[in-house]
Image (spheres, helix red, strand yellow):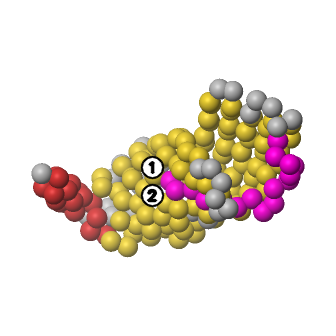
Amino acid sequence: MKKIALVLVLALFLAVGSAFAQHPSGWGIGVLGQYGGEWSGGPGYGGIALSLKPASSSIFWGINVHIDKPNFGFSLTGDRYIIDTIFVPGVNLGFYLGLGGYAGLGVAKNYFSLGFGARLPIGLYILPVEFLEVFAGFVPRLGVDFYLGKDAPDDIVDFPATNWSVEFGIRLWL
């Protein structure tokens, strides 16, 4: 049964996908799931973000607010795609490689952190219908983190702060 459903979905992608071959113009808005960690093997983290692509800008934005009492976090990402190309036109399957940046603030019970740095988003996307995009990517990051407070890590400054994330999302084009 699963194989039949998969074949039907792929047939739909092939039939509808050949009508266009690039990102639609206009606003893109969606949700983005993230999971990441540190290259050194520290604990992983996850979250859900709002994904925005304004019509008048070439920047893909991610806005994340994390509330887990007593902790609070806010982060903002912005990426510009250097390579953005459809490589399987029949199904509108594309590849992207970009450069971007991030900034984040975390507040815990007895300390807070501030971090910022550069991102290198690499991923795939598919546009099964003209107004819908599904995407997945891997994002290595390099930056600097600052920690202050009673229970902050011993090192106030963490440089280079190296981490990674895996992102999955869906975006509607308006």
Secondary structure, mark 2, is: strand
Question: 11 or 168, which is in the foreground?
Answer: 168
Identify the residue at image location x=86%, y=37%: 149
| Mark 1 residue crowding within 10 angstroms, few (<14) / some (14–19) / many (20+) | some
Is any part of residue 78 visible from this angle?
no
**Magenta residue check for 146:** no
Residue extending farthest bottom: 87
Identify the residue at image location x=78%, y=45%: 114
Report the magenta stretch's main SS.
strand
The residue type indicated by label 1 comes to Gly
Task: Report which residue position mark 1 lands on.
Answer: 169
**Quadrant into which the C terminus falls:** top left
Which corner quadrant of the image does residue 93 belong to?
bottom left
Q: Residue 149, relative to residue 114: is it above or below? A: above
Is any part of residue 36 visible from this angle?
yes
Q: Earlier in the sequence, mark 2 or mark 1?
A: 2
Q: Which residues are magenta?
A: 152-167
The residue type indicated by label 2 comes to Ala
Drawn side of residue 41 relative to residue 146, left or right: left
Residue extending farthest top: 69
Which corner quadrant of the image does residue 98 belong to?
bottom right
Callout count: 2
Which numbered circle lies on residue 136?
Answer: 2
Question: 110 or 162, which is in the foreground?
Answer: 110
Cβ–Cβ below 8 Å for labels 2 and 1? Answer: yes
